[in-house]
Amino acid sequence: MKVTKLSPFLLLIFLSITQTSFAQADHFSYENYVNEQGDSLPYRLLIPDYAPSIKYPLVIFLHGSGQRGNDNEAQLTWGVLNFASDYNLKMHPAIVIAPQCPEKLSWDNLSEKDMTLQKQPSKTLELVMELITEAKKTLAVDTNRIYITGLSMGGFGTFDAISRYPNVFAAAVPVCGAGDPRQAAKFAHIPLWIFHGALDDAVSPSYSRDMLMALTKAGAFPGFTQYPEVGHFAWIAAYSDPMMMQWLFRQSKGN
């Protein structure tokens, strides 16, 4: 078997990226939310180096299906560590909550047949909303700047959350997700930036285009980015986009 060796330069870059990721992950503490009924939801929490007198935006990050489980670590695999980069901690300090969805469950409750939003939210989304309520009570959260974003299954969950709780969020960034276009009028007032890969064969980009069309028809002006020659991993570019970060943290219900 042939073994490919990295050049010293590439090896240095690889080690630098790996060490940076580990350092960013260390910024997130291990937490577990338990409600009065005994239901629990593990999550990772990023707290910026903040002054107690200042209120900070809250970012809810919903991971994809491949990061489900109970190790309270896998949900940091993609995307969310960008919020913990040195640059973003300096320019956009925020409280970030990254819950982990249990195996075989989902953030959303959409009909797989026709993408119809079901009457009741998923149990995991209910717990996420309870966790937001708890965070508002115990952390220095600016309640006018609560954002939600997610990738793949988390993109589904993002659309589901703003459909059911449109008055909670100041902005949303669904990445390679899907939702029920018939619900668009309920959250047309929420600033959105939708991302998808044009060649995504796991979640069809037509789902995001359907949401774009429905929102536009409802009078909204959502951002929409479809990356050419990109498959399902659209989140790599989306969460690395400084313009998206700048746009997101400008949003406030108080404006």
Image: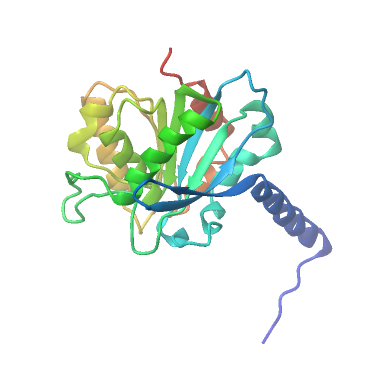
Number of numbered markers: 0
In which quadrant will I find the C terminus?
Answer: top left
Residue 50 appears in the picture as rendered: yes
In which quadrant will I find the N terminus?
Answer: bottom right
Q: Residue furthest right?
A: 8
Which residue occupies the foreground of this view, 229 or 165?
165
Q: Residue furthest top?
A: 255
Q: How is the image coloured?
A: rainbow
Q: Residue at x 71, y 49 (%)?
A: 23
Q: Residue furthest front?
A: 36
Residue 252 vs 49, above or below: the answer is above
Q: Is residue 185 left or right of residue 50?
A: left
Q: Residue at x 45, y 31 (%)?
A: 147
Q: Residue at x 44, y 60 (%)?
A: 68
Residue 227 appears in the picture as rendered: no
Residue 75 vs 218, above or below: the answer is below
Q: Position of residue 232 (x, y in %)?
A: 43, 54
Which residue occupies the foreground of this view, 80 or 105?
105
Q: Is residue 117 left or right of residue 71?
A: left
Q: Position of residue 171 (x, y in %)?
A: 41, 28
Q: Position of residue 228 (x, y in %)?
A: 44, 46
Q: Is residue 128 left or right of residue 207?
A: right
Which residue occupies the foreground of this view, 66 or 167?
167
Q: Position of residue 109 (x, y in %)?
A: 25, 49
Q: Residue at x 26, y 35 (%)?
A: 164
